[in-house]
Image (spheres, rainbow, N blue to C red):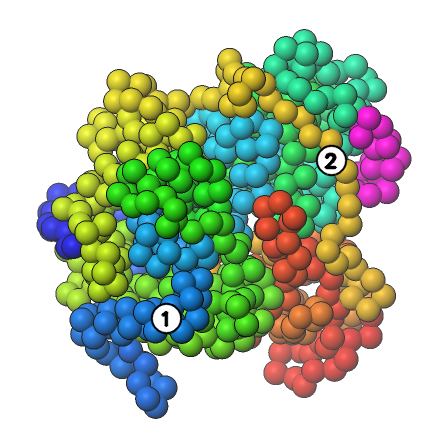
C-alpha cells in the first residue's frame, strides 16, 4: 500500500501538528512560511509560538530519514525498508510462536490521525490478534472520557463550539492553564470578558490564566473533588439548584444530595484551603449570573480519583441546570492534537471504532462484518497504558512491542521504571520522525512523514472532524504510518485487509466501522469537511448537518437523561508526610509540547526554554537558604531529579511544580506516581510527595537540604 503524495506550490490550508485546538494554518510548500488561517472558525488566524515555528521540524537536521536496525554491536545502523519491515515481521512472528498471541503489544498515540488510529487498532486486532493495544491518550483524557460517558452517555471533550465560551456569563476553569497550553483560545476568553462575563480559575498555581481571573481559588493539590462537592453543598443550602432541570432531565440526584451533606464549608476549607466566603461567591456567580460554563483540564483528571473528580464537577453543572444551555454547560479541554479522535477509533484497550466496546458481542459482530473476519477471532479487552508497559518482559507479559508516535520513556509516570521495562523487551520497534528517548532504545526505528507531508483527518477538542492536507513532498525514504502498517500486514499474511488506494479510502472504511456507533462518522466525507470547515460528530448520514452542540434536548443514555453520581473525596495515592513533605505537580510550558520530542528540536523554542526549572515559593526558598537559579535535588519514592530553582510567589509554599517535556536526568516523570484511577486507569501525574534531598549553587557541590 502506498499513497500518492503530490507537491503543491500554493499555500495549503492545513492544521498545526501539535495540540487539540488544531489551529488552522496556511503553509507554503517549503514549510518555512506559516501563518494562521483567518477563515478557520476556531483560531480565527491566531497561532501560538509552537504553531508559528512548526515548519522548522520539516527539514530539521535531527529528523530521521531512513530506517534503522540495531546491529550485533548494539548500534542503530541505516537499513532498507524491506530489511527493516522484514525484521519487524520476523520478530513479531517469533514472539507469538514462542509466547502466544498476547505477547506482542501495540502502543499508539493521540497525535495520530483518525485513519492511523483506526488502522493501528485494526492491525492489533486482525493481524496480531493481541488484546494489548493502548495509547498515550490514556495519560491525557481517560478520566474525562469515563466521566462524560457515565454522566452523559457520550464522551466529547467540548459538547459545544469553542466560540460558546464567549457567551458564558460565568466561566469556571478548573485545573487548566489554556493561556499557556492553547494560547489562541484566549480570544474567546477576551470576548467573554468584553461581554461582561466573569472568570473563575481553580489552580494550585497563579498561572497566566489564573492571573486574569476575577476569582482565583488556589486550592490544595488533589482537593478538586472536595471543592466541587463543597460548592454543591452551598448551592443546596442556599437553594440555588435548578429543581425543574434536575426533575425533568436527570436521574440520581437524591444520592448526591446525601453524599454532599458532609461537605460543610468548614470541612471543605480544611480539605481545600478555600474559605467559605469564596465558596459562596463562586456558587452565586455560577447559579445567578446567566449561562455558566465549567471547563476542567488535567488538574482534576490526572489523579487516582480523576473520574470521580470529573463527575463531581458534572454534578455541580447539572445541579445548577447549566448543561445544554447555550453558553453554559460542562466541558473538558482536550490536550493532544487528536486526543479526541484518537480515543474514538479503537486504539484503547477496551474499545472498537466509533466508541464501540470490545466486550460487547453486537459491537464485535459489526466490526467483524466491516473487517471481513469472524468476530470470534477478535481478542478481548487488554491492559491499559501503564499496565501494558509495566508488563514488558515480565512472565505472561509483552515480549515485543510496536510504538507508533509516542515517547513513552518520557511521557509515562515512574519513567525510570518504564525505561527498565523497555530494556527487558525481546524486541522494540518505534515509528517516529525523531530519535526520541523511546526510539533510542529500539531494535528497529521506522522514519515517518510529518503533518505537512501527509493527509488524513483529525478531530479537534470540539468534536469537529477536520482535514490535514499535504503541503510538501515527503523526503525520500520516509513513509507514512499507514504504509508501514500495510507493509507489515502483508508480511504477516493479512495484506488483503490493508489494501487501500488512498488515505480517503481508509477514512471511508472508518465511516462504515463507526456507523451506528456513539461516535458516528458515517455522514462525514472529505468533500464535506472541505466545504464546511469541518463537521462535528455524531453525523449519521451525508445529509445530516453534524452536531456542534449536544444535550440541548436529550442526553445519550437510553432514557435521554443525564446521570448524577455520588462521589466522595479520598486522599491521593501518596500524600505529603514527614519524609516527603511537599506536593509535586507537573504541567506544561507554552514553548513545548508533551514529551518535547518535536519542540526540543525547534531552535526558537529550545532557546526560550532549554531546560525545565522547578517553581517554588520564596518562603520555602528562604527555609532552604537558596535563591533563584540554585540547583535542587527533588526526590520522590521513585527517583531524583536536579532542577534549577525558579522562585515564584504564585505557587503555594507547600507545592513544587515542574514541566514534563524533558527526558533523561531532567525528566519530571522520574518522580511521578503510577497510582491508577480504578475506572479510567489514569496515572496520578498531578500529585506526588517529594522532598528536597540536596541544594547547591550552580557549579557548587550539593549539600543536604536542612529544611
Ligand atoms: Fe494552535 Fe495548539 Fe498549534 Fe498552538 S500548539 S498553534 S494553540 S494548535
Q: Quadrant of residue 706?
A: bottom right
Rendered residue at 22%/64% (across/down): 491
Magenta-drawn stretch contains 668 = no
Q: Name the residue rendered at 70%, 59% in the picture.
A: 688
Q: Residues within 10 Å of mark 1 (few under 14, many from 20)?
A: few
What residue is rendered at 78% in x and 70% in y?
624
The 10 Å Cα crowd at callout 2, few under 14, some 14 to 19, many 20 or more, is many
Q: Which residue is mark 2?
A: 567
Q: Nearer the viewer, residue 509 or 446?
A: 509
Magenta-drawn stretch, dominant element (helix, strand or loop) = helix
Calculate the distance from the C-alpha at mark 1 to the C-alpha at mark 2: 46 Å
Q: Is mark 1 within 8 Å of ligand 1?
A: no
Q: Nearer the viewer, residue 466 or 349?
A: 349
Residue 591 appears anywhere in the view:
no
Q: Quadrant of residue 457?
A: top left
Q: Is residue 83 visible?
A: yes
| Image: magenta residue range | 258-278
Q: Which mark is residue 97?
A: 1
Q: Is residue 334 found left or right of 618 in the rendered image?
A: left
Number of numbered labels in the structure image: 2
Secondary element type, mark 1: helix
Amino acid at each position: 500500500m502506498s499513497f500518492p503524495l503530490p507537491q503543491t506550490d500554493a499555500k495549503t490550508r492545513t492544521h498545526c501538528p501539535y495540540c487539540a485546538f488544531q489551529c488552522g494554518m496556511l503553509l507554503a510548500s517549503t514549510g518555512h512560511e506559516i501563518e494562521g488561517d483567518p477563515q478557520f472558525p476556531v483560531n480565527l488566524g491566531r497561532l501560538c509560538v509552537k504553531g508559528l515555528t512548526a515548519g522548522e521540524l520539516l527539514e530539521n537536521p535531527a529528523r530521521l530519514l531512513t530506517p534503522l536496525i540495531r546491529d550485533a554491536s548494539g548500534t542503530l545502523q541505516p537499513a532498507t525498508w524491506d530489511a527493516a519491515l522484514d525484521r519487524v515481521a520476523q520478530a513479531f512472528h517469533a514472539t507469538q510462536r514462542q509466547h502466544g498471541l498476547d505477547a506482542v503489544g501495540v502502543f499508539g498515540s493521540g497525535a495520530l490521525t483518525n485513519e492511523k488510529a483506526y488502522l493501528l487498532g485494526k492491525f492489533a486486532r486482525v493481524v496480531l490478534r493481541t488484546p494489548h493495544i493502548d495509547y498515550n491518550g490514556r495519560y491525557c483524557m481517560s478520566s474525562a472520557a469515563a466521566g462524560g460517558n457515565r454522566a452523559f452517555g457520550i464522551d466529547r471533550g467540548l459538547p459545544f463550539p469553542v466560540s460558546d465560551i464567549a457567551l458564558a456569563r460565568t466561566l469556571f476553569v478548573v485545573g487548566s492553564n489554556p493561556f499557556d497550553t492553547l494560547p489562541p483560545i484566549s480570544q474567546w476568553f477576551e470576548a467573554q470578558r468584553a461581554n461582561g462575563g466573569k472568570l473563575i480559575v481553580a489552580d494550585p498555581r497563579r498561572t497566566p490564566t489564573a492571573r486574569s481571573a476575577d476569582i482565583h481559588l488556589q486550592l490544595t493539590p488533589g482537593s478538586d473533588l472536595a471543592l466541587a462537592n463543597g460548592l454543591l453543598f452551598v448551592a443546596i443550602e442556599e437553594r440555588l439548584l435548578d429543581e425543574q432541570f434536575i426533575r425533568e432531565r436527570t436521574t440520581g440526584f437524591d444520592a448526591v444530595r446525601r453524599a454532599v451533606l458532609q461537605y460543610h464549608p468548614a470541612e471543605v476549607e480544611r480539605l481545600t484551603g478555600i474559605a467559605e466566603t469564596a465558596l459562596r461567591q463562586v456558587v452565586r456567580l455560577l447559579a445567578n449570573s446567566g449561562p455558566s460554563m465549567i471547563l476542567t483540564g488535567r488538574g482534576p483528571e490526572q489523579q487516582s480519583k480523576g473520574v470521580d473528580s470529573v463527575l463531581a464537577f458534572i454534578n455541580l453543572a447539572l445541579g445548577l441546570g447549566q448543561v445544554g444551555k447555550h453558553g453554559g454547560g460542562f466541558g473538558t479541554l482536550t490536550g493532544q492534537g487528536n486526543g479526541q479522535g484518537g480515543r474514538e477509533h479503537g486504539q484503547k484497550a477496551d474499545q472498537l471504532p466509533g466508541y464501540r466496546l470490545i466486550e460487547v458481542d453486537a459491537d464485535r459482530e459489526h466490526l467483524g462484518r466491516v473487517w471481513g473476519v469472524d468476530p470470534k477471532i477478535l481478542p478481548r479487552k487488554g491492559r491499559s497504558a501503564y499496565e501494558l508497559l509495566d508488563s514488558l518482559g515480565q512472565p505472561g507479559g509483552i515480549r515485543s512491542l510496536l510504538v507508533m508516535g509516542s515517547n513513552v520513556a518520557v511521557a509515562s509516570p515512574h519513567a525510570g521504571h518504564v525505561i527498565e521495562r523497555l530494556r527487558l523487551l525481546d524486541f522494540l520497534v518505534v515509528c517516529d520522525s525523531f530519535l526520541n528517548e523511546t526510539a533510542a532504545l529500539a531494535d528497529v526505528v521506522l522514519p515517518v512523514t510529518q503533518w505537512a507531508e501527509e493527509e488524513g483527518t483529525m478531530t479537534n477538542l470540539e468534536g469537529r472532524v477536520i482535514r490535514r492536507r499535504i503541503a510538501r513532498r515527503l523526503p525520500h525514504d520516509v513513509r507514512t504510518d499507514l504504509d508501514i502498517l500495510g507493509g507489515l500486514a502483508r508480511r504477516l499474511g493479512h495484506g488483503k485487509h490493508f489494501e487501500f488506494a488512498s488515505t480517503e479510502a481508509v477514512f471511508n472504511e472508518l465511516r462504515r466501522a463507526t456507523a451506528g456507533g456513539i461516535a458516528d462518522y458515517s455522514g462525514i466525507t472529505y468533500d464535506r469537511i472541505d466545504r464546511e470547515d469541518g463537521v462535528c460528530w455524531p453525523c449519521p448520514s451525508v445529509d445530516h448537518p453534524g452536531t456542534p452542540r449536544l444535550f440541548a434536548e436529550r442526553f445519550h443514555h437510553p432514557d435521554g437523561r443525564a446521570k448524577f453520581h455520588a462521589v466522595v473525596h479520598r486522599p491521593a495515592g501518596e500524600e505529603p508526610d514527614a519524609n516527603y513533605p511537599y506536593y509535586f505537580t507537573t504541567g506544561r510550558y507554552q514553548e513545548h509540547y508533551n514529551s518535547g520530542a518535536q519542540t526540543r528540536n525547534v531552535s526558537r523554542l529550545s532557546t526560550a526554554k532549554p531546560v525545565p526549572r522547578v517553581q517554588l515559593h520564596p518562603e520555602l526558598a528562604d527555609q532552604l537558604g537558596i535563591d533563584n537559579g540554585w540547583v535542587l535535588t527533588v526526590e520522590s519514592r521513585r527517583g531524583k531529579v536536579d532542577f534549577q530553582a525558579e522562585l515564584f510567589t504564585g505557587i503555594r509554599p507547600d507545592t513544587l511544580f515542574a514541566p514534563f517535556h524533558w527526558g533523561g536526568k531532567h525528566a519530571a516523570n522520574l518522580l511521578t506516581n503510577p497510582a491508577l484511577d480504578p475506572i479510567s486507569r489514569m496515572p496520578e501525574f498531578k500529585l506526588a510527595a517529594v522532598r528536597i534531598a540536596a541544594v547547591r549553587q550552580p557549579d557548587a557541590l550539593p549539600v543536604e537540604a536542612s529544611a
